[in-house]
Image: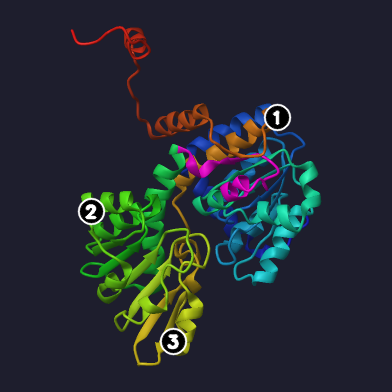
């Protein structure tokens, strides 16, 4: 059996069933896996992955394994690992270092165990693997030919590294593929965040005032789903373009200080730090619920919440009650970590099918393109379009094709007003 550290190998059978269920809803990745099994494009390749250890991730890892790769996997968040899935993957020969409830020290121990496998390609969700390699494990750089990054937060970090000239190997921003962010970020985050809130609280959303901090693709999806559940949605933003879009989409837009007095539920989805702070908390209603759907647990200033509170207690799984000095109560979801994975199961398999298909194909692309310079690259358009076509095929949807006349017309300039 492979080297590993997981919660309980006895959970493997339950994990098998979860992975089987996810696989049934990921037809694109299954098609890629079939080809990988036949062609072995990743034969002998060592892949280090720092991803949420979910049933969908398991389908990706098994696809890479089918292509001939040796995979070492750790979780990209201390609370997002599905222990059953981790156990199942160990039984499948994957080196897994992940369990739900890791401390910060344990989390980075797991990251370093993956680096110990001397990966040639890295897969990241949040860039903790890549940044650890670039800071404390620089000896690993000599083997790496490239990597991928799954989420907005990670891409922001990696682009900052590239701007400063500190990125030492090429990374493909899978997050920026149309077939990733238009579906995973929007529809996946919207649905899974609502799922996480409801599992943790079981509150009625209809009639509540729901504040969405950030109107990027994740915030768009969340606002749309909250509105669909009957909530009155307020959007807060710092970007004038996105704020204007939220207005045109029919949402109230205002500063967070003003929204703090009105909201019943507050969810951050910005990728930034200390979005909800003490000054906002001090204006909130008794019983306000606050949570985060961004990657890191820094969007809500938990130190501020601790400072203005006299006590806290766990009232439900993933729901802590903070008693403020003036007697009001504020409820924090999932320790301020991403609520859709900490309190629920993350994005539905159907959208992760496209995200992880991009991952698998970009790994193959990196193997074939080993002369790329150290910078952050977009997903090649042909990969993005292939994933879209395969997804439509999996859904049983057919579309039109342009005639030769139409192709010629769109590639020329001579024809004008007739």
Image-quadrant location for residue 4: bottom right
Q: Earlier in the sequence, mark 3 or mark 1?
A: 3
Q: Nearer the viewer, residue 178 or 30?
A: 178
Residue hosting label 1: 371
Span of residues in magenta: 158-177
Q: Is residue 390 above or below residue 157?
A: above
Look at 62% across and 59% down and name the residue there: 75
- Can residue 190 be seen here? The reply is yes
Q: CA distance from mark 3 to mark 1?
A: 54 Å
Residue 290, image x, y percentages: 39, 73
Q: CA distance from mark 3 to mark 2?
A: 33 Å
Q: Is residue 153 above or below residue 308?
A: above
Residue hosting label 3: 308
What secondary structure is marked by label 2?
A: helix
Image-quadrant location for residue 228: bottom left
Residue 324, image x, y percentages: 40, 89
Specify the farthest residue to the left. 418
Is residue 174 highlighted in magenta? yes
Number of marks in the rendered image: 3
């Amino acid at each position: 059996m492979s080297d590993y550290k997981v919660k309980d190998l006895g959970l493997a059978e339950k994990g098998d069933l979860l992975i089987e269920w996810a696989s049934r809803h990921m037809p694109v990745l299954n098609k890629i896996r079939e080809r990988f099994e036949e062609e072995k494009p990743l034969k002998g390749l060592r892949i280090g992955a720092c991803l949420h250890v979910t049933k969908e991730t398991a389908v990706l890892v098994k696809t890479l394994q089918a292509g001939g790769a040796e995979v070492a996997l750790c979780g990209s968040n201390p609370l997002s690992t599905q222990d059953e899935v981790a156990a199942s993957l160990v039984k499948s020969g994957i080196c897994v270092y992940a369990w739900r409830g890791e401390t910060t020290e344990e989390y980075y121990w797991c990251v370093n165990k993956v680096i110990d496998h001397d990966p040639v390609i890295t897969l990241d969700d949040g860039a903790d693997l890549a940044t650890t390699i670039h800071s404390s494990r620089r000896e690993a750089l000599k083997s790496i030919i490239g990597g991928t990054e799954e989420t907005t937060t990670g891409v922001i970090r990696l682009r900052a590294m590239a701007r400063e000239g500190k990125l030492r190997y090429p990374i493909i921003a899978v997050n920026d593929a149309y077939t990733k962010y238009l579906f995973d970020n929007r529809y996946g985050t919207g649905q899974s965040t609502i799922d996480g809130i409801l599992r943790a609280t079981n509150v009625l959303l209809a009639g509540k005032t729901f504040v969405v901090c950030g109107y990027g693709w994740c915030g768009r999806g969340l606002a749309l789903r909250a509105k669909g559940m009957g909530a009155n949605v307020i959007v807060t933003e710092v970007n004038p373009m996105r704020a204007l879009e939220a207005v045109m989409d029919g949402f109230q837009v205002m500063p967070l200080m003003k929204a703090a007095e009105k909201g019943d539920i507050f969810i951050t989805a910005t990728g930034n730090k200390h979005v909800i702070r003490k000054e906002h908390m001090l204006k909130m209603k008794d019983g306000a619920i606050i949570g985060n759907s961004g990657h890191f647990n820094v969007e809500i200033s938990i130190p501020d919440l601790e400072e203005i509170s006299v006590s806290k207690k766990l009232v439900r799984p993933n729901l802590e009650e903070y008693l403020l000095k003036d007697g009001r109560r504020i409820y924090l979801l999932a320790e301020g970590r991403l609520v859709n994975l900490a309190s629920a199961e993350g994005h539905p398999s159907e959208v992760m099918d496209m995200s992880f298909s991009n991952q698998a194909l970009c790994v193959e692309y990196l193997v074939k393109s080993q002369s790329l310079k150290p910078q952050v690259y977009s997903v090649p358009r042909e990969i993005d379009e292939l994933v879209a076509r395969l997804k439509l095929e999996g859904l049983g949807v057919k579309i039109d094709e342009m005639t030769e006349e139409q192709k010629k017309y769109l590639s020329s300039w001579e024809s004008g007003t007739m």
